[in-house]
Image (cartoon, grey):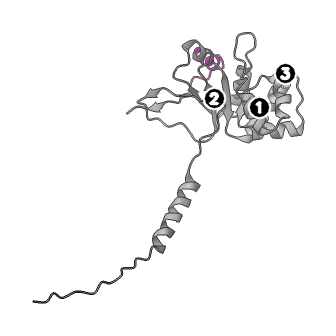
Amino acid sequence: MAKVKSKKHDTFIDMTAMSDVTVLLLTFFMLTANFIPKEPVQVVTPGSISETKIPEANIMTVLVDKAGHVYMTLDRKDNRLAVLEEISKDYNITFTPEQKRSFVEQPIIGMPVSLLPEFLNKRLEDQDKLLKEYSIPNDSTNNQFRQWVKHATAINKDLSIAIKADATTPYPVIKKVLDVMMGLKQYRFHLITVLDA
């Protein structure tokens, strides 16, 4: 008995619709993503089981690395400029309009006030390199960090405070930051951690 051979048909699948959907999804995720702000130092946060989320707006983040360097960020540019004006009055330093513009564009506050004018005259890339060498002074004789926090919380009454410290940061360093908060009657703040499984 003879075998009947069936004709082979080429199957054509139009992938145009699939590629369109892929591009639309990629665009959607790129536009809705929250990017991690740049930080001058790498901080590995400790783990916890708390699932409380920090606010996304009106927030001041205090960054403490394992060496004890303290930095801070303010998410609103108008608040940054107003705080700089108050700091300039405290330390009798005058900032040029270009320096003020540079301060507003630099998201990290992390220099001693005496070096701030020279720091703000540099390009943004050079500023990022210098931030790794310095930090906001937070010792008993020169507590500039207290002044920054005092003015930031006075200018924006709705400001939320988040503290992000390295898991290996010694407790006395963290206690100095917390003492500043307590001294300014800022008893509500968030501690940023990684969620444990």
Q: What element carries label 3?
A: helix
Q: Earlier in the sequence, mark 3 or mark 1?
A: 1
- Residue found farthest to the front: 1
Q: Identify the image quadrant of the C terminus.
A: top left
Q: How far apart are marks 3 and 1 (CA)?
A: 12 Å
Instruction: Characterize the local packing of mark 2: few (<14), some (14-19) or many (20 or more) Cα atoms within 10 angstroms.
Output: some
Q: Is mark 1 on a helix, strand or loop?
A: helix
x and y percentages locating residue 145 in the rendered image: 71, 21
Which image quadrant: the N terminus?
Answer: bottom left
**Residue positioned 28% across, 87% down in the render:** 7
The answer, for residue 170, to whether it is visible in the render is yes
- Where residue 139 sits, quadrant-wise, is top right
Query: Which of the two marks, 2 or 3, is nearer to us in this view?
Result: 2
Q: What residue type is labelled 1?
A: Val
Above-or-below relation of 155 to 78? above
Mark 2 → mark 3, Cα distance in angstroms: 27 Å
The stretch in magenta equals 175-187
Give the mark toward the camera: 1 or 2: 2
Query: Which residue is depicted at the point 45% across and 69% down?
Result: 18
Residue at 69 percent across and 17 percent down: it is 138
